[in-house]
Amino acid sequence: MLLAFIITYLILTVLVGIWASRRVQTSGDFLLAGRSLPIAISSAALFATWFGSETVFGASSEFIQGGLYAVMEDPFGASLCLLLFGLFFARKLYNMNLLTLGDFFKTRYGRTTELTASLFLAIPYVGYIAAQLVAMGLVLCAVTGLALWQGIVISAVVVTLYTYIGGMWAISITDFIQSIIIILGMVILAVILTGKAGGLDNIIKEVPAGTFRFLPTWDAREIVTYLAAWAVLGLGSIPSQDVFQRSMSAGSARTAELSCYFAAFLYLTIAMFPIFIGLCIKHLYPEMIAGDPQMALPNMVLAHTALPVQILFFGSLLSAIMSTASSAILAPASIFSENLIKPLTRHRYNDRQFLLLTRLSVLAFSAVATAMACMRSNIYELVGESSILSLVSLFVPLTLGIYWKRSSSTGALLAMALGMMTWIIFEVYETEWPSLVPATLVSLVAMITGSLAWPQQQEAEVKAL
């Protein structure tokens, strides 16, 4: 019965994508839903940006092992990203009328910077997509007994199909429906488990000391590591195409800004439920966390709840993962087609051909991510790594490009290259400090130094467009 429900749910999701495809007439419809989403759908789309595998599987398992202090990256860092994007980026970027985030680097710095930035924008998504496919594969593995790689392949086919057909319209509409299912599923499961535990007090009183520790001790290294954990998603996901794409699909600049605030609040609130559910599992069924902690939630639901609860849980779980995976696939495909292939082919394609090219890019990125998902299975690591790459290369050029008039293309290129090189060096030669800290500082220094030393190159390059 549960398997039949999952199959039905996946089929209905594809049908929604087919229905949404009727609204797709141009590449703008496919990539940004015609910039026409109302605030409810726009907020749901932004909320669903990260409420996927890293929240339900990754954050809950990290909390089980390390307490609240272990989940600063997500959900706290992710909520911070949405808040900061609404405060400082959404309105300014919306008013520029851009199709992709790569277009910002073209408009602000020129074509060379656009091409370089687009590589840094697109490549990290492979790991992020892989994390979502691993999570869906784990669900199918738990329910059907399939091998993990088989579940990953099936998941990739379903998510890729409705993204290929409907683009951002399909993603936005399914996100709205899936967000409702997510909230209902998480709340009801938390209430049921609280009742089984005999009330919230029984759960809290057995929590080990330090579980809810939120702040670091007064140690310099620990403070830097703590801030770095916030920054991974909090700053690293600001220069990301999926956040940009979902916010820029709103009907107005004001709607884009408000949607970020609503989504940040909703995300931080609802993301507490998987963490709380993990705490309930640790209290009620400690044997469930002895193996792979990522599987604690689905295994507990299968073993200790009735069929209606299982349907609700796995429905909400699939909703969360699919909503994140779909936009994660569309984001790099948009960058690849608009900011890499299109300029390199000297804009020889008309809009219909460009739309086909974007759809083919969806297939390509999905295929590469599927292969990675079959080789690696730690969800939290896959997500974190993808955001770190954006932070050390793109955050500084984007932010200073908006707020510092003297920013130049040379400064931006140096910031991207030296930031990434520094991160790689510190990863290879492991130190006691998080690699993203020196890498981000080097990126900032390179941006300022390069812009001051070569201030005219930006103007010359932009005039040449």
Image (cartoon, grey):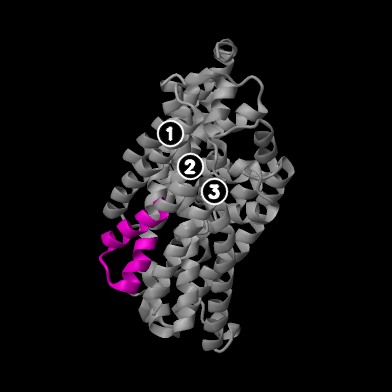
**Farthest front residue in view:** 22
Residue 429 in view: no
**Residue type beneath disc 2:** Ala
Residue located at (52% from left, 59% from top): 51
* Residue 28 position in % (x across, y down): 57, 37
Q: Which residue is mark 2?
A: 331
**Residue type beneath disc 3:** Arg
Above/below status of 285 relative to 53: below
* Residue 443 position in % (x across, y down): 50, 30
Is 242 a magenta residue?
no
Report the magenta stretch's main SS.
Answer: helix
Residue 79 is left or right of residue 335, and the answer is right
Above/below status of 306 relative to 465: below
Per the image, label 3 sits on a secondary structure element best described as: helix
Badge number at residue 336: 1
Q: CA distance from mark 1 to mark 2?
A: 9 Å
Task: Please tell me which of labels 3 and 2 falls first in the chain.
Answer: 3
Q: Which residue is mark 3?
A: 22
Q: Residues within 10 Å of mark 3 (few under 14, many from 20)?
A: few
* Residue 272 position in % (x across, y down): 57, 67
Q: Residues within 10 Å of mark 1 (few under 14, many from 20)?
A: many
Dot 3 and dot 2 residues touching (CB under 8 Å): no
Mark in front: 3 vs 1: 3
Task: Please tell me which of labels 1 and 2 falls first in the chain.
Answer: 2
